[in-house]
Structure formats: C-alpha cells, structure tokens
Image: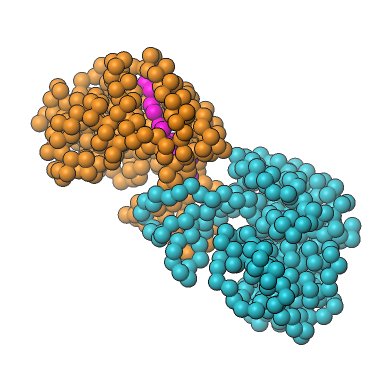
Chain colours: A cyan, B orange
Amino acid sequence: MILTVTLNAALDLTYRLPRLRPHAEHRVPPAVERPGGKGLNVARVLASLGHETVATGFAGGATGDTVRALLAETSVTDEFVRITGPTRRTVAVVDDEPAGDATQLNEIGPDVTPAEWAAFDDRYAHLLRDARAVALCGSLPPGVPVGAYAHLVRAARARRVPVLLDTSGEPLRRGIAARPDVVKPNAAELAALTGATDPLRAAVAARRRGAHAVAASLGPDGMLALTPDGAWHATPPKPLPGNPTGAGDSAVAGLLSGWVEGLAWPERLARAVALSAATVAAPAAGEYDAAVYEKLLGQVRVDQL
Amino acid sequence: MILTVTLNAALDLTYRLPRLRPHAEHRVPPAVERPGGKGLNVARVLASLGHETVATGFAGGATGDTVRALLAETSVTDEFVRITGPTRRTVAVVDDEPAGDATQLNEIGPDVTPAEWAAFDDRYAHLLRDARAVALCGSLPPGVPVGAYAHLVRAARARRVPVLLDTSGEPLRRGIAARPDVVKPNAAELAALTGATDPLRAAVAARRRGAHAVAASLGPDGMLALTPDGAWHATPPKPLPGNPTGAGDSAVAGLLSGWVEGLAWPERLARAVALSAATVAAPAAGEYDAAVYEKLLGQVRVDQL
C-alpha cells in the first residue's frame, strides 16, 4: 500500500455565492463538506487510480469525526490517531468573480500533546512495514515539533521506503535536510526555501540542501524535475480554465503512483501533469476529471533538460 | 418552566481577524462555537436569569450533535427533536473595521420531512402542558410549512399559555394573524410587515393584524410597546458601544421572564431594555454583562404614551 500522512487534517467547508461582500449578511446553501488537508487529497486520488491507500495523521473532536465519516465513504483505509484537540476547519468562499481565487479562512489546527505525537510515531513506524511509498504533506499543527518531517523522513529511509515531502517554510527547510527521495514544492515555496526566483536555479539549490529529487509544480507551466536520473520539464498541451485547488496534491499522487508502478521519471511526470490539469478542469475542488486525465496523458510533452 | 422554540437552530462559528480581504487566504485561530438560532439565545438568557428553561426545535447531523453538546454545558433542558438533515451553520467573520458589522454567511437550514414536523408537533403539545410561557423565534427551515408559527401560536393559546412570536417576513405575517400575546419585531421587520416606517404607526398597524401586544425593539432607542394595558416607550440611559448580535433575543428573555414573574408592562420593558443594552456591552456576541444589567435596570426611563 501507499501511505499518506496528514498531520493537520481539516474539515473543508466550501460556500458558493454570487459575491462576497464584507460586513454584509449572506443567505447561503449548506456548505459542501470534504475531508481536507493535502495528504488526504493525495490519498483520494491514489485510491481513484486503483492503489491500495492508507491515510494517517491526527483527528479529534466532532470535526475529526466528520472527516473520518467522509473518509469512510472512499476506499482509503483510515489509520488516523485520535487526539483530544478538535480537527481544524477550513472555510472557502467561492464567488463569481471571474479571475478571483476563493476567499480562504484556514484554522491553524489543534494542539497536539507530546503523548499524542509519540502515539503517532508508533503508528507510523507500524504502518511503514507494509508501505511501498509514503507522502508527507501539508502544514504542522501546534505542538508537533518543527522538525517532525525530518524525523518521519529518516524513519522511512531507514526502512527503505521511498518518501515524498510536500510542505513549506521551516518544516520544509528542516525536512529536506533529512534527505527525502522527492520534494514537491511549488514555485513560491521553492523560491522561499532557496532565495532563487528562477525555478531551475532554485531546484538545483534545493537538491544541494538534501533532496534526492526535486519535482517543482509550476502551475499552468507544468512541472520541472531534477533527479538522480536526469532533468526534465513536463508541459500540459494547453492551460485549462478552472479551479487550481488540489492540483499540486494530484501531482503528488501521480508521482508516487508512478514510482511504485516502476515507471521512469518522464512517465511519472507526464502522469503528474495530466492529473494536475484534470484536477483544474474538474468542477469540484480537489477532484479530477478521469476522462480529461486519460485524454491529456498522451499529450503531455516531456523535454529532457 | 419557560419553553423556547428554535425550528432552525444553528451551530454559530465566529472568526476574528484583523481584516477580511476577499479572494485572499487568512490563517485564523479556531472558530468560537456557540449554539445558535434566536430561540437558543433566548433560552440561555432565561436560564442565566434563574428561570427553568426548556429548549425545543430540530437538530440533526454532526452539527446538531455539537449544538446539543454545547447546550448540555448550560442549565437549559434539551428537548430537541432529532431529524435526518444536518443542523445549519452560520459563519460570522468579525474584523477590526470600527463601524462594520460582522460578515455573515447564514446557511438556509436542513430539509425537514412531514413526519419530522409531525413529531415536533407532538413534542410541542406535550411540552406546553408544563409551560408558563413560550417563545417562538427565528426563521423556518425548508420543509416546515410557512404557516407553522400560526399553528404553534394557536396551540399555545388553546392551552392558555402566553406566547411570544419573534420572526420576520411571511412566517410573521401568517403567525400574527393567529393572535399571539406578543410580537417583538425590530423596526425593519415592523416596517416590512405593515408598510409604515414610523414605529408607532407601524405598531398600531401590527396590533390591527392580530397581535395582542407589540413590543418593537428600536436598537439604541430602546423599545416601544403597544399593549392592552397601555403604550410605553422605554429608553436606555445612553447608547453603549459594542456588538448588537443577540440584543433582540435578550429583550425577548426580559419580556417573557417579566411576564411569568407577574411584572407589569413598564417593568417588563425596563428589564428587556436593560438586558438588551447589557448584551451589546458584553465582549462575546449573544452573552450579556450581568453587572451592566444590574446597573442599567434602575436607569431605564419608561414613558407612558
């Protein structure tokens, strides 16, 4: 199975309305509820691709129960560790502003106690035994040490389980030094990590910091990968209009599924870029359009650098 | 006991942040959760005043469970009827804009089936037996007949239980024709009901539509009451700065508690206006400041008209 880790899972609530007006009252249909956090998005896409997928992390409170109930409707296996603090919510308000992103309120997450972090560590070590690959995704909730990802990367590598890290800021800075097999920053995260704004120069600098491979998602420009096997740039056939939420998570699912299926880097990248574009094209945030994916897969251009 | 009815209860989520920027991402502390809906606000204030209070209405889903768990932390007795549809959420975003109201997203509420509405009607009839007064408050969820309040007013009056109605729009229009003992509109609701913008003329017109008494909340101008015993205007000593959320619900609690304690109308109005002002002055929306209430109670001016 493929293991995904979501330490700061969320109950994602999405509201749609014609226009968000600050300081006004809006009558709205019920929120669309989804299990959220980057690792859970990755898990759902892996499961849709037919991979046996296990999701772990922390879940607590009524919001955590709702996240797990929603997860039970998918084929992802729930191995979340129960905590006392309530799982955070994210609130997205999507309006009809043509070029506008959603207005997002992202709660910072629950306090995790040292005992809960230790319980997670045990669960993770146990789950690694059967894992063919592991994805570590998203932000850290308060209470989890900032070096958490570095620790989890080392544990995976000690068991020779390929490990992909997708986070930002200080957790990325520390995690990358533990030599993950792949990091998947976007252009802004890569620039913040390395100080270089050119993605290629930044990717070179990120490899120097410890990552064996860097696969950077560049939005409509596809994906740039610097790996021990070579360097490539994968480009979708044309930019698709739509909602980019979750596109990076679908790319992670593409990279990891390709890895465990034994695909070479160029084919992994083609899959990641096609899944990413099919996610932008899907009507619901964080879902992907399977027909668009199948169609785009043969149309992604992969250039060796 | 005093019975409060909240057919469209809510899980109120409040976020505080420096400034809400449409189409931007905001990192926020966890939402403050409160049991919401006007009838539940009334029930909490009645309980704080020392009255035995029973709350009924509909509750469903994980959000309904959370509302009931929060209610269990108070001394209000929970007689909610379980339904399949989930209890709605309201999201309030409070920012530092000095004169600005909160930005509100109010979900419309769950679908209530005819069988659920019938089950509520049985529960309500049963609870009326021990009720010394009843408050019918707030909007109707989808599926409940628009004449619901008219029906509930008639049932209370058939049992000689004093009934106060606090709603708006078509449910108010229909409910008032069933001759409730009191309606408590605000100035805008009164104008929408009667077409008259002057509160006194509008209150006269509202009585003509069926209400035995009209107690209109006029914000910082206090309360105007036209009753079978006379007409009064109650004015707080000075406008207090603060958050007006729930001020009208505190006024309802003041009127009803005064009624069952056998106070005359001028004293009921003084209590309603003092509680309302003490709610505006409280730091949390929908709570009231007990010290401010005690202090203001003797300072409310009640003029006979």
Residue A250 picture location, percent across and down: 68, 64
Q: Is residue B182 left or right of residue B202?
A: right
> Which residue is at the far bottom?
A305
> At 39% across and 49% down in the image, what residue appears?
A27
> At 32% across and 26% down in the image, what residue appears?
B151
Residue B83 picture location, percent across and down: 51, 32
Against A201, residue A246 (above or below) is above
Query: Is residue B290 at all visible to an observer of this figure?
Result: no
> At 52% across and 39% down in the image, what residue appears?
B86
Q: Is residue B11 magenta?
A: yes
Instruction: State which quadrant residue A189 falls in.
Output: bottom right
Q: Is residue A304 left or right of residue B237?
A: right
Residue A76 picture location, percent across and down: 73, 50
Against B239, residue B154 (above or below) is above
The answer to which of A182 and A170 lies nearer the viewer is: A182
Give the quarter of the figure containing the C terminus of chain B.
top left
Q: Which residues are magenta?
A: B2-14
> At 83% across and 70% down in the image, what residue appears?
A263
Q: Is residue B236 magenta?
A: no
Give the quarter of the figure containing the N terminus of chain B.
top left
Residue B260 picture location, percent across and down: 30, 18
Against A284, residue B257 (above or below) is above
Q: Could you tell me how many numbered marks the image carries?
A: 0
